Amino acid sequence: MADKIALITGITGQDGSYLAELLIQKGYTVHGIVRRTSNLLRSRIEHLRRDENIYGKRLFLSYGDLSDSTTLRRIFRDVRPSEVYHLAGQSHVGLSFEIPESTCDEAGMATLRLLEIARDQPEPLRFYHASTSEIFGSATESPQNENTPLRPSSPYGCAKAFATQLARVYRQAYGLFVCNGILYNHESPRRGENFVTRKITQSVARIARGLDAGLTLGNLESRRDWGRAQDYVVAMWMMLQHETPDDYVVATGEAHSVRDFVEAAFAVVDLPWEKYVKHDPAFDRPAEPKQLVGDASKIHKMLGWKPTGTFDQLVREMVEADLTALDKSR
Ligand code: NAP
Ligand code: F7E
């Protein structure tokens, strides 16, 4: 296992940070691509970067941007990865209506750039593409599986559908080992602060400590299939260990509304949610997918993956982490 070299795009994100931990723990050498930002603190991987036994020994970071093919190609040449996990890109669906062009470049075209680089490598490698339930958008069937037709309903979903189909083409046309992980929403204390779950749990913690008076949200009736990010990165790794490349839906199979999430989060701190939560149409989206719920029976049967924990445990874990972080910072 010691000679396994993984390259992760998007290592500073929620999934990238958990995946880096998992792979280091499995004995991999991990290389991450980070983009230049004005603030050097990369909070989700800062604990790894500060660990002398890890940083510079098992974990390496290189500067690169998804739009910069020359640099990406150079990183592949220098790192010579045996496994590539392509996770980077603008991942906010609502925001993709406001910045469609850059979203499509990052979620769509950048995958093409990376697949082309992968195709040119002297040694074969295994490539994971971070696909999403958003490719199904206004699906006509529920739950969705790997054969459900692609009907995306946002610029983000369209770009990911393009990249997903392209990954299939590269697998079939060139025999590349490429897997699409069709992941449904997955959350954790490291979830970005402008996704609904984290926005809720962070706000609940602040309200419970008397720092905020209320929480403003968009559509409370939206339903999602929410799982734990820590489980979902294991699924990514499992896909690349199988003898043949394939696509897999990764989901819990259970749908809950944003309202359910709000109720469960306020219940953790024993406060009545109706008193604090308001609707603001500014957070509504021009279009919403229909009922997105995944059928993960293929990955369960083929790779033995299954989700852990319950919806209530996930909500509790996130609220408690935000309470702890808030108390530490004061
Ligand atoms: P995330 O927390 O938003 O992280 C995105 C990562 O991409 C960050 O490391 C970000 O770097 C990097 N990035 C963005 N634009 C870049 C660019 N132009 N060049 C280089 N790096 C760039 O996303 P996530 O939740 O971990 O999700 C990982 C992937 O899975 C994404 O592709 C997402 O679309 C997909 N996905 C996520 C879910 C989910 O529920 N989380 C479900 C299905 C699919 P900075 O730290 O510098 O911003
Ligand atoms: O929205 C509603 C919103 O932004 C969930 C990404 O990781 O999962 C994620 O995309 C729902 C939507 O996630 C607010 O309208 C209500 O119906 O947390 P979200 P998402 O759009 O499902 C998929 C699988 C991905 O691939 C993406 O990368 O919640 N909602 N009020 C709100 N959403 C937000 N963000 N903020 C609100 O105030």
Image (cartoon, rainbow, N blue to C red):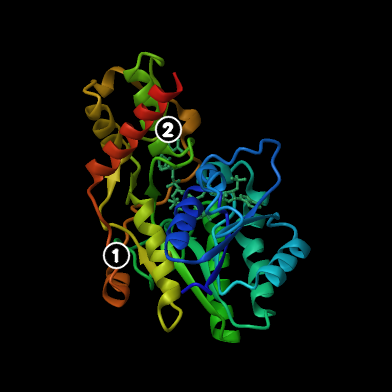
Crowdedness of circle 2 by 10 Å Cα count: few (<14), some, many (20+)? some
- Describe residue 125's horizontal placement relative to residue 67 as left or right: left
The three-letter amino acid code for the residue at tag 2 is: Lys
Viewer-side residue, 106 vs 59: 59
Residue 290 % position (x, y): 37, 52
Which dot marks residue 212?
A: none
- Describe residue 26's horizontal placement relative to residue 304 as left or right: right
Residue 221 % position (x, y): 32, 38
The three-letter amino acid code for the residue at tag 1 is: Asp
Relative height, residue 328 to residue 119 (above, below)? above
- Toward the right, the furthest residue is 70
In three-dimensional space, the C-alpha distance between marks 1 and 2, rounded to whole angstroms, equals 27 Å
Relative height, residue 171 to residue 137 (above, below)? below
Q: Which residue is mark 2?
A: 199
Mark sitting earlier along the chain (1/2): 2
Where, by quadrant of the figure, is residue 148 drawn? bottom left
Where, by quadrant of the figure, is residue 77 drawn? bottom right
Foreground mark, 1 or 2, reads 2
One can see residue 183 in this view: no
Q: Secondary structure at mark 2?
A: helix
Relative height, residue 147 to residue 207 (above, below)? below
Residue at position x 23%, y 51% from top?
309
- Describe residue 77's horizontal placement relative to residue 259 as left or right: right
Residue 95 % position (x, y): 56, 41
Viewer-side residue, 163 vs 46: 46
Q: Which residue is mark 1?
A: 295
Ligand 2 closer than 8 Å to label 2 CB: yes
Residue at position x 44%, y 26% from top?
280
Q: Quadrant of the C terminus?
A: top left
